[in-house]
Amino acid sequence: MSATHPFGAGPRGNIDPILNEVMHALDRLLTDNESTAIDLSSLPFGPGEIEELEEQLGIGEIKAELDALGKSLIRETIYPGVWWLEHRNTDGETAGRYIEITRVPEILKAQDADIGAGLKQLNRRLEPVGDAAVT
Amino acid sequence: MKDERTLGEVLLAKGVSRRGFMKYCSATASLLALPPAMVPRIASALESARRPSVIWLSFQECTGCTESLTRSSSPTLEGLIFDSISLDYHHTLQAASGDAAEAARHAAMEENRGEYLVLVDGSIPLGNPGYSTIAGISNVDMLKETVADAAAVISVGSCAAFGGIPGANPNPTGAVAVNELVKDMPVVNLPGCPPIPTVITAVLAQFLTFGQLPDLDHYGRPRAFFGQTIHDRCYRRPFYEQGRFAETFDDEGARLGWCLYKLGCRGPITYNACATVKWNQGTSFPIESGHPCLGCSEPGFWDEGGFYQPISTARIGGGTALGTAVAAGAAIGAAAAAMSRRRQAKTIKEG
């Protein structure tokens, strides 16, 4: 059932406050290099509001897909530095939605533990070659 | 046998990458209603956390609470939290039965003395202990024996927390809540019929992450989830403030998604997180589906009058009282909205 929002045809209940929050966070990123993350699951969205927020933020230049414990979709919005992150579980169900205001979302960066594990794996592969392996 | 592995080791053994672990930690922060900035601290704590032993006792219940929890199919992020505990005893989920099951419970109690968690769903009949027994042991005896060396008890669902439907008038079995019998250790109440699965996993995650139980309200419920009413966070609240109400389930107001107060909605007096956490993997909650909140996470919800009578009518009686309550609600709502706007304007001006 679609509900008519009491605020009329204009922006709906949560949209404007969140866009304002994003605007202030973007300003802090530019001036103080401070990143912000907004957890959308803690907000009371009405039917269709999340989709409207997503539409208002739009789709920017970068899209990435992470495959770890289910898919995660990470994409920059039309506002550079504002990222839409959606974590899904292995059944494709949404496990979390966030707006991150940062230069690059932390989860996109290669992590030291994974880099170390990769290095070990590469070493093992090169072992027969002997001297080429990095210790 | 006691599992000495840390959660970090468990996840590593499952082939979970650091990115996957970070994702898991983000979900945990979200579960605990903590800001995303806490993720690194959660990651650090979880990495070295050891899996707590959990004994789950089911008494006078309908298995709806377990159903609620297991609805999200494994392996999910929430499922991983269950991987990160050692569920040593659960009638419905464990493979063992009879003596082997009871032996598992005793072994878990012995090996984890003073450290294990006891989760209980269902109320305990005191009228006649024979009304509900497991392996020939009455519920009350099993509860007392099991909690004796526990770290804490978590009452899952309204039956365990408040007596629930078994305890509803005339309460034929003499059903009581867990905290009426367990007085000398922390008891966390997670009411709801059933409770939101996320709330159950969040409390376990908090214990796992920080080694402590959450802050509780006067009914023993975690404030993070039961700190505000459904009404406080309801997306239909602006209609309440404007005095726009559905009068029947099929009138124009109902179709337009107006406030369900006059159809008996208990949202204004019910503390729970349904309006934000929602149900079925965040799809919706009863009000969003067009049905009033029944108030199932409040004590005695079953005996609080007809579900489809407005709360003012049910409690006070008479149409005049309803009219007054609705008018007062609208006035308070309008005043609160005006104050909020003034506060916002002030913040922007100062900013």
Image (cartoon, grey):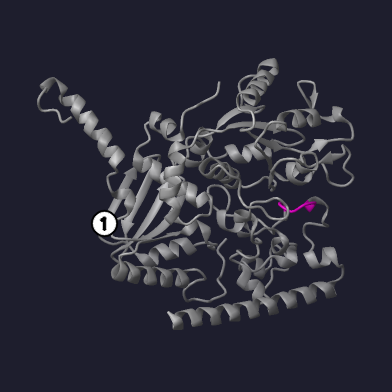
Residue A91: percent from left, percent from top: 45, 40
- Classify the position of the C terminus of chain B by image quarter: bottom left
| Magenta-colored span | B296-301
Q: Which residue is mark 1?
A: A62
* A21 in relation to A121, above or below: below
Residue B172: percent from left, percent from top: 89, 39
Query: Which amino acid does the dot numbered 1 rest on?
Result: Ile
- Left or right: A88 in relation to B305: left
- Left or right: A53 in relation to B290: left
* B213 in relation to A102, above or below: above
Residue B297: percent from left, percent from top: 71, 52
Q: Chain of mark 1?
A: A
- Left or right: A85 in relation to B257: left
Q: Residue at (20%, 25%) from the top-left corner?
A: A124
Q: Is residue B262 visible?
A: yes
Q: Nearer the viewer, residue B12 or B338?
A: B12
Whether residue B313 appears in magenta in the rendering, the answer is: no
Give the crowd class for mark 1: few <14, some 14-19, many >=20 residues within 10 Å: few
- Classify the position of the N terminus of chain B by image quarter: top right
Q: Nearer the viewer, residue A8 or B53?
A: B53
Residue B50: percent from left, percent from top: 50, 33
Q: Residue at (29%, 43%) from the top-left corner?
A: A111
Which secondary structure class fits the magenta region best?
Answer: loop
Q: Nearer the viewer, residue A129 or A14?
A: A129
